[in-house]
Image: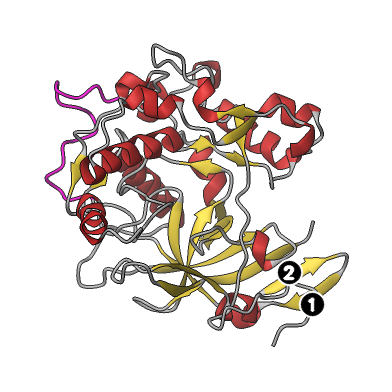
């Protein structure tokens, strides 16, 4: 597999409490003129793929319609939204997601969905991990404390994307998937690796990833707190029970300062489980509040038919999804709500993506195909 390198800059104060970014997602200001694809000693300029590509998605403001969502975001300066490869961190501001039936002809129901989506939910230790993660990065880079007069501090960076074509470089939301390295103070810090090694995130694998990549990230995750070393509060408070879902942690303004602290008032259990399961729990809340569905949370979660494979099976099958035993996600949740796996022990199926331009014309599938 080849890879794409895109140089650029990152604002190190974009994270909570100074900005909306969390541990596993960030805004990246790219120099797309210098974006290069490398494979077999061949180098190809690929900035146009990211400049012109995107997807058509349901228009939140016009029921039943779609609008073009560009990979290259224009709000607040030209940028890419980057999702860090191979990790998943506690949520800081997740809103219910309705992938199916955004509008089925019932306007009142559509309005109800969007009322429910005004709430955003967070997990215990989401804000804490984000704050410690960003503070640690700034210390390593020699960046001083926040100054409201100059709220943005940009440092040199690059994003590396392990893919041979644009359809493997971004997700269904148009976010670039890759490894981000910050450069400064004589150091190069890979954010994905730093988040795992410091105990601020979990491993999260998809079938499109290479086995060696999964093994390396698993080792980083396992090394945190080994041999009696200190552990982060997140890693010291990992739950294996659905009952530790905390629906009270919501706000209508993402991450407002009046939210309860992660260290926990007595009313909160302050334990965290797999963020992917947490997101499904929040989707359940949204369906309950917007659509009046009465399914119990445990029943809803156990009915999840999303296909997964065990990491051990995937490795034994040499990374071949078709040769690995398949399980429904819900089957790994017991009748008492206990999880029969730990985060990082399963591999999720990669969702297919077709990147198009604003005329709905598909972009070339390989970066080696010339694209103006």
Would residue 170 be visible to someone looking at this image?
A: yes
For the record, the magenta segment spans: 255-271
User: Vertically, is 370 above or below 125?
Assistant: below
- Where residue 153 appears, x then y in whole percent? 36, 68
Q: Residues within 10 Å of mark 1 (few under 14, many from 20)?
A: few
Q: Residue furthest top?
A: 336
For disc 2, the marked residue is 365
**What's the magenta bit mostly, secondary-structure-wise?**
loop
Q: Residues within 10 Å of mark 2 (few under 14, many from 20)?
A: some
Within the image, what quadrant is residue 78 found in?
Answer: bottom left
Figure quadrant of the C terminus = bottom right
Q: Residue at x 69, y 77 (%)?
A: 46
Q: Are marks 2 and 1 in contact (CB under 8 Å)?
A: yes
- Where residue 62 appears, x then y in whole percent? 31, 71
Numbered tag placed on residue 265 in the rendering: none
Q: Secondary structure at mark 2?
A: loop
Q: Residue at x 71, y 26 (%)?
A: 325
Residue 112 inside the magenta-drawn segment:
no
User: Vertically, is 140 above or below 147?
Assistant: above
Would residue 232 be visible to someone looking at this image?
A: no
Q: Is 341 displayed left or right of 34 in the figure?
A: left
Front residue of 236/113: it is 113
For marks 2 and 1, give the CA distance: 8 Å
- Where residue 197 appears, x then y in whole percent? 53, 36
Figure quadrant of the N terminus = bottom right
Q: Secondary structure at mark 1?
A: loop
For disc 1, the marked residue is 369
Residue 256 inside the magenta-drawn segment:
yes
Q: Residue at x 30, y 48 (%)?
A: 93
């Amino acid at each position: 597999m080849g890879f794409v390198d895109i140089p650029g800059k990152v604002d190190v104060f974009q994270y909570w409490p100074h900005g909306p970014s969390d541990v596993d997602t960030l805004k990246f200001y790219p120099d797309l003129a210098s974006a290069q694809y490398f494979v077999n000693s061949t180098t190809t300029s690929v900035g146009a793929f990211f400049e012109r590509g995107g997807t058509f998605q349901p228009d939140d403001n016009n029921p039943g319609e779609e609008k073009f969502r560009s990979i290259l975001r224009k709000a607040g300066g030209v940028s890419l939204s980057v999702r860090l490869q191979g990790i998943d961190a506690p949520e800081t501001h997740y809103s219910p997601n309705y992938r199916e039936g955004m509008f089925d002809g019932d306007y009142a129901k559509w309005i109800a969905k969007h009322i429910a989506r005004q709430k955003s939910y967070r997990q215990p230790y989401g804000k804490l991990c984000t704050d410690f993660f960003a503070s640690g990065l700034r210390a390593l880079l020699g960046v001083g404390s926040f100054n409201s007069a100059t709220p943005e501090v940009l440092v040199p960076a690059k994003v590396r994307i392990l893919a041979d074509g644009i359809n493997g470089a971004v997700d269904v939301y148009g976010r670039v998937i890759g490894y981000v390295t910050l450069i400064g103070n004589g150091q190069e810090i890979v954010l994905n690796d730093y988040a795992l090694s410091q105990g601020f995130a979990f491993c999260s694998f998809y079938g499109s990833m290479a086995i060696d990549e999964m093994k390396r990230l698993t080792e980083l995750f396992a090394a945190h707190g080994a041999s009696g070393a200190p552990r982060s509060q997140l890693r010291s408070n990992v739950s294996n029970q659905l009952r530790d879902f905390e629906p009270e942690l919501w706000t209508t303004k993402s991450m407002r300062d009046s939210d309860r602290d992660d260290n926990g008032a007595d009313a909160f259990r302050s334990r965290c489980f797999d963020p992917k399961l947490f997101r499904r729990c929040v989707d359940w809340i949204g369906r309950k509040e917007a659509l009046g569905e009465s399914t119990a949370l445990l029943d809803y979660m156990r009915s999840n038919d999303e296909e997964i494979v065990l990491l051990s099976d995937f490795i034994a099958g040499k990374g071949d999804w078709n040769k690995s035993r398949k399980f429904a996600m819900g089957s790994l949740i017991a009748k008492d709500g206990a999880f029969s796996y730990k985060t990082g022990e399963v591999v999720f199926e990669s969702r297919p993506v077709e990147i198009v331009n604003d005329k709905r014309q598909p972009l070339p599938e390989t970066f080696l195909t010339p694209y103006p």
